[in-house]
């Protein structure tokens, strides 16, 4: 019994031990499970957080990618814009100098043997005057119009570009012969025959053209462009609306011209210019009533150079403004000197170049010259050629009127040489006209010229204008003019253009016959200016 009960206790103890162990195991298992579940939860939570981070990173990456796409598109647009700026002229939207040069280089590199490749360089005549007169906006409008007209006349074999300023250039491929190409040049010149409408006014523009042909003139783009530039420079030197084809001999001509240009700068700086004076004689009194001032270049090596040899170059380079201003001031000073010598009724005539006449400060410059010299405005006569006056009739009327308002006399030079002279005369408020010397050459023999001169004189009288005949070289011419009531003449019959000292002598011998006798032995190599 004791033994049994002791065994039960052992069993109970054992059962308790087992139960404790089981409970411990359950607790341990539960704890481990809890730890595992917590770990899973934490891992799941971490995964969720990681997912959210990845999702946010993806969104950021997607946004960044979208920004990159936008930046890429902007870069493409910028590159296209830069390419356009680099190769397209912003104003006319034609290819520019860089684009043309690259295309020329490529075309020359692929030019087949026996083929020719002409390059035409076009420069607008008198573009600067329009720019200066109307303003740059109208100049831009003119360039756009020119570009459109050129587009209409070229074909698929032509590559047209704006080369800068008022210059265009055309490369022509598949040219069969130069005869057909010359027709193309003529067609291009014809497109400028129609007026351009700017500021509700009609303007007529011509162009000068230079041509160089590969491979004859060069197979190098750089040299071909240099040669076509030389050809254009020569064309502009020949006058408006002209064409010049490059020849090697032009290089020497251009070099000489550039040397002259350099010497002209030196002449202005060193005061190498002088005024010569040609007498104007009143046929009624046989007295000198005035002088025309003519500029001469006293070159230290070449001697006296007449105006026709350097004035065109001075016009092209803009140096005419300095020269013209000096002539005006010096002529006024000289007139004052003669008037102080007792020749009170003497007048002085000064030629104005096209650039001077279109200078917005002309009136102020003239007033300054008169004031400095101390002469009366009516003793100064400014001469403009018929072609200058009729180039822009509206501007001319306004400028002439402004000059007349300060008392200046305006003379229309070379009258009768072109345009519809008599039709326009009634609109121009000039003081007198100068009959061109070309009429004097045949006035005695040619009945037509005699009739024209008589008609000009009669017309001028009807408009209350004085008439001056230039180029009078014979007594027969002078006699006819006197009978026709032309009151003032100038020419070699009385005097060649002379220095100030010789002009002084002329004034002291004011009788026309004495003047003629003084100079009848004079050499007449000097060209009348």
Image: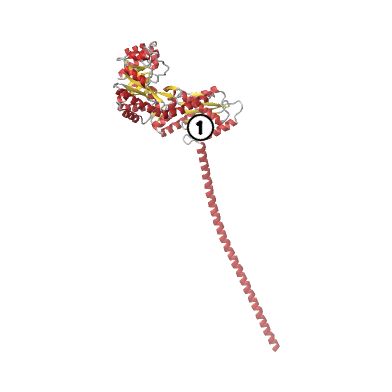
The front one of 491 and 242 is 491
Q: Position of residue 380 (x, y in %)?
A: 32, 24
Q: Position of residue 73 (x, y in %)?
A: 53, 45
The residue wearing badge 1 is 161
* 7 horizontally vs 463: left or right: right
- 319 w.r.t. 10: above or below: above
The front one of 394 and 467 is 467
Residue 424 showing in the rendered view: no
What is the quadrant of residue 462 in the picture? top left
What is the quadrant of residue 217 in the picture? top right
> Helix, strand, or loop for circle 1?
strand
Q: Position of residue 418 (x, y in %)?
A: 40, 20
* 467 horizontally vs 93: left or right: left
Residue that extends furthest to the bottom in the rendered view of this protein: 1
Q: Position of residue 90 (x, y in %)?
A: 47, 36
The front one of 159 and 482 is 482
Residue 89 showing in the rendered view: yes
Q: Quadrant location of the N terminus?
A: bottom right
- 478 w.r.t. 245: above or below: above
- 179 w.r.t. 220: above or below: above
Q: Quadrant location of the C terminus?
A: top left
What is the quadrant of residue 415 in the picture? top left
């Amino acid at each position: 019994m004791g033994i049994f009960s002791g065994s039960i206790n052992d069993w109970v103890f054992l059962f308790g031990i087992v139960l404790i162990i089981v409970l411990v195991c359950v607790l341990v298992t539960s704890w481990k499970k809890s730890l595992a579940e917590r770990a899973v939860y934490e891992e799941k939570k971490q995964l969720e957080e990681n997912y959210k981070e990845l999702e946010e990173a993806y969104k950021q990456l997607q946004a960044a990618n979208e920004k990159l796409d936008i930046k890429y598109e902007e870069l493409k647009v910028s590159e296209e814009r830069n390419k356009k700026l680099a190769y397209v002229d912003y104003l006319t939207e034609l290819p520019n100098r860089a684009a043309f040069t690259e295309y020329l280089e490529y075309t020359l590199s692929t030019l087949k043997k026996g083929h020719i490749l002409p390059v035409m360089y076009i420069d607008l005549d008198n573009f600067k005057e329009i720019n200066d007169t109307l303003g740059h906006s109208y100049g831009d409008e003119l360039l756009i119009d020119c570009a459109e007209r050129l587009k209409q006349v070229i074909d698929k074999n032509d590559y047209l570009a704006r080369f800068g300023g008022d210059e265009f250039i055309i490369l022509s491929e598949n040219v069969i012969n130069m005869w057909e190409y010359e027709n193309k040049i003529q067609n291009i010149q014809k497109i400028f025959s129609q007026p351009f409408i700017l500021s509700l006014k009609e303007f007529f523009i011509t162009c000068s053209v230079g041509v160089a042909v590969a491979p004859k003139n060069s197979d190098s783009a750089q040299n071909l462009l240099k040669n076509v530039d030389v050809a254009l420079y020569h064309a502009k030197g020949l006058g408006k609306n002209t064409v010049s084809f490059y020849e090697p001999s032009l290089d020497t001509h251009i070099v000489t011209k550039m040397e002259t240009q350099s010497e002209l700068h030196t002449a202005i700086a060193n005061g190498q210019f002088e005024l010569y004076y040609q007498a104007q004689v009143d046929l009624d009194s046989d007295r000198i009533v005035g002088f025309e001032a003519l500029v001469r270049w006293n070159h230290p090596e070449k001697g006296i150079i007449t105006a026709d040899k350097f004035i065109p170059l001075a016009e092209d380079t803009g140096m005419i403004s300095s020269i013209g201003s000096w002539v005006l001031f010096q002529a006024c000073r000289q007139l004052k000197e003669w008037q102080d010598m007792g020749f009170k009724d003497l007048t002085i005539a000064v030629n104005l170049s096209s650039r001077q006449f279109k200078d917005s400060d002309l009136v102020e410059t003239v007033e300054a010259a008169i004031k400095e010299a101390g002469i009366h405005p009516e003793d100064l006569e400014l001469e403009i050629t018929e072609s200058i006056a009729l180039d822009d009739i509206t501007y001319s009327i306004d400028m002439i009127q402004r000059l007349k308002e300060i008392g200046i006399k305006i003379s229309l030079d070379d009258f009768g040489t072109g345009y519809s002279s008599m039709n326009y005369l009634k609109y121009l408020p000039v003081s007198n006209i100068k009959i061109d010397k070309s009429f004097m050459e045949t006035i005695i023999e040619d009945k037509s010229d005699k009739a024209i001169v008589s008609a000009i004189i009669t017309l001028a009288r009807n408009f209350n204008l004085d008439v001056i005949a230039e180029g009078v070289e014979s007594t027969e011419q002078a006699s006819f003019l006197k009978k026709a009531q032309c009151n003032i003449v100038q020419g070699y019959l009385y005097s060649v253009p002379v220095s100030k000292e010789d002009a002084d002598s002329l004034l002291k011998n004011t009788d026309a016959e004495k003047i003629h006798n003084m100079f009848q032995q004079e050499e007449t190599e000097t060209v009348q200016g």
